Amino acid sequence: MFDSGFGGLTVARAVLDLLPTEHLVYVGDTGRYPWGPRPLGEVRDFARQITRFLLHHHGVKCVVVACNTASAAALDALRAEVDVPVLGVIEPGVRALVSATRNGRVGVIATVGTVASGAYQRAMAATGADVELTCAACPGFVEFVERGETTSDQVHVLAERLLAPVCRAGVDALLLGCTHYPFLARTISDVVGRDVVLVSSADETAFELEALLRATGLARAVAAGGASHRFLSSGDVAWFESLGRQMLGPELGPVEAVSWAR
Ligand code: DGL
C-alpha cells in the first residue's frame, strides 16, 4: 500500500481492522509529498516506481493505491503493467457516496490533480446514478495534515473558503476524495454542517480488498501465524513514526527509511 505521506494510513487502519491476518507494507512518500499539485505524469512515475519497489523488494501479492491522486494518475497504467491485482480508492469511494445521499446532490473534495483529472466525474457517470455532482479542489489541506495541524483556526479559515462551492450546492453527502482528508473531518464537518454525511473511501476499499483476496484465493489463512506490519517513509522517519502512530495507532512500529535511485 502506498500514499504520498500520512493520508493512506486512513486506508491502512481500515485494512488492519478488517484483515488482521494479512501482512502489510506501507510506503509513505513523504520525501516527495505533496503529490496533488504535481503533473499527473510525474505522479504516475512515482506510483510506478513505488509499485515496482513493493513487488521486487517485498514480494507483495496485491497493491493498494491508497491515494486518490495516484489512483487518478496511474491506476490503469499499473493494472496493465503488473501481474498482481491493483486496487485504487476512487471507485469504492464513489459507490459509498451514491449509497449515502438522500437528496441526490453529492460533493467530492480532493487535490487539484484529482479534480482536474476528471476521474471522479467519470467514475460517477459510470455508476449511472441520477445524482448532481459538485467537485472542489482543496489545495493546502494535505500540508496541514502532514504538519499534524488538523483543527487550528488557520485550517478552519481555509476550509470555509474552499468548501463554499459544496455548501452552496446543497450537498447532503460529501466524499473525502483525498486519503488525507479524514484527519480533517472535524473541521470539515464544522464548516459544512452536521447534517452532511462525510464519506471516506477507506472502509469501502478495505471491503473491496477482502472480496478480492477471497475471490482470488490470495487471502492469508488465520493459522499461518502473526501478521507483520511494516511502515516505510522516504522523508523524516522520526516524524513519520511519531505523528503516524498518533494517526494510525500502536501497529505503527519503528519506521524504516526508503530512498529512491535517481
Ligand atoms: N493522499 C493523497 C490523495 O489521496 C495525496 C495528497 C497529496 O500528496 O497531495 O490524493
Image (cartoon, rainbow, N blue to C red):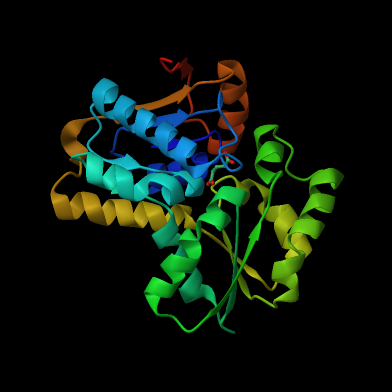
Q: Is residue 10 visible?
A: yes
Q: Is residue 84 above or below residue 245?
A: below
Quadrant of res 238:
top right
Q: Residue furthest left?
A: 217
Residue under the point 23% across and 27% down? 59
- Percent coordinates x, y for residue 30 in the rendering: 56, 27
Q: Is residue 202 above or below residue 97?
A: above
Residue under the point 56% across and 82% down? 104
Q: Is residue 244 left or right of residue 19?
A: right
The mark total stands at 0
- Percent coordinates x, y for residue 75 in the rendering: 36, 48
Residue under the point 49% across and 63% down? 120
Q: Camera-side residue: 31 or 28?
A: 31
Quadrant of res 50:
top left
Quadrant field for ligand 1: top right
Q: Is residue 61 left or right of residue 69?
A: left
Quadrant of res 245:
top right
Q: Is residue 32 above or below residue 211?
A: above
Q: Is residue 85 visible?
A: no
Q: Camera-side residue: 248 or 1?
A: 1
The quarter of the picture where the N terminus appears is top left
Q: Is residue 152 above or below residue 207?
A: above
- Percent coordinates x, y for residue 56 in the rendering: 25, 23
Q: Is residue 196 left or right of residue 230?
A: right
Residue under the point 81% across and 58% down? 161
The quarter of the picture where the C terminus appears is top left
- Percent coordinates x, y for residue 230 in the rendering: 39, 25
